[in-house]
Amino acid sequence: MPAMFFSVAGSVKKLTSRTPKGVPDCFEISHSGQTALVRVKRMKGTQRYTLRVNAAVREAVLTMPSRGTKAAALEFATKHAAWICARLKRLPLAVPFVPGSVLPLRGLPHILSHRPESRGRAWTEASEEQTTPILSICVAGDLPHFRRRVADYLKREAELDLSAAVQKYCDMIGVSGRKITLRDTRSRWGSCSHDGRLNFSWRLILSPDYVLDYLAAHEVAHLIHMDHSEKFWELTHQLCPNTDRAETWLKFHGSDLYRYGETSAETKFE
Ligand SMILES: [Zn+2]
């Protein structure tokens, strides 16, 4: 799992109260002209107030004791307002699926190009302009369908690449091929269930190909070792020599993949 969260923890006086009512789901804080929304989550068993910035959804999340008070939550968030605002400001800008946006398909920048007159759905093109190759993802059809078609295209490409990589690694360890499921997961890039089903984030198609390939090796290795033991890592390295390189990439650039497309529930992928 990549480092997607930056957090600060601390305690405030008067941590608990017998009347936990009246704490809103979220509130606004501000710091030198910048305002930020803070989502509040109550958690049983914690005595601490914790703040983190979730890069995936670009919001601050305050975790508090289930019996904490609104005043204490607000005080804690206000105290760290500068930290929250600085972290949010530092997040790279969101890139919507609109004509002209640039997406790193398999790690290579591609311009989204609208081709309303063309047939088909979406495809890639490479054109040479002043000796620099320009890569495009071309999308046919009317503009209202543009966003959905880009999303469908990326998901389809992710499925093709991941299925092939999973098959390759299944062959290497001598297990039968697996069907994969794509999700828009926020906390991890892939997972392997106890009954051997493999799930991946479709966003991996926006990472360099060795990163997607590594994730396939990682999850296939879980078919043999269901943990992150030494033996598991030994097998992963054996299958995929790019393991460390890919882990490093995900650590530094992984959260960046959430910039692309809408992050609201509207663009959920099943
Ligand atoms: Zn794992």
Image (cartoon, helix red, strand yellow):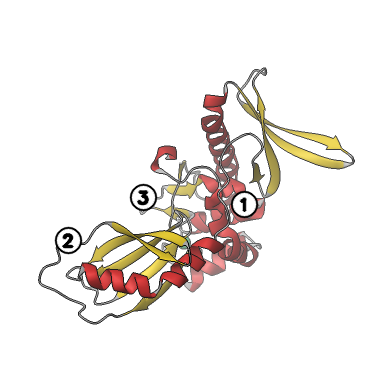
**Residue type at the position of mark 1:** Ser
Q: Which of 246/64 is in front? A: 64
Q: Position of residue 144 (x, y in %)?
A: 52, 25
Q: Which residue ends up furthest to the left in the rendered image?
A: 18
Q: Is residue 65 visible?
A: no
Query: Is the shortest distance between ligand 1 and the CB of mark 3 under 8 Å?
Result: no
Q: Position of residue 264 (x, y in %)?
A: 42, 44
Residue that carries the numbered disc 3 in the rendered image: 195
Q: Position of residue 83 (x, y in %)?
A: 46, 72
* Dot label at residue 105: none
Residue that carries the numbered disc 2 in the rendered image: 22
Residue that carries the numbered disc 1 in the rendered image: 207
Q: Is residue 110 left or right of residue 219?
A: right
Residue drawn 55% across the image and 55% down it = 215
Q: Quadrant of residue 265?
A: top left
Q: Position of residue 91 (x, y in %)?
A: 54, 60
Q: CA distance from mark 3 to mark 2?
A: 43 Å
Residue drawn 57% across the image and 21% down it = 142
Judge depth for marks 2 and 1 and give the one in front: 2
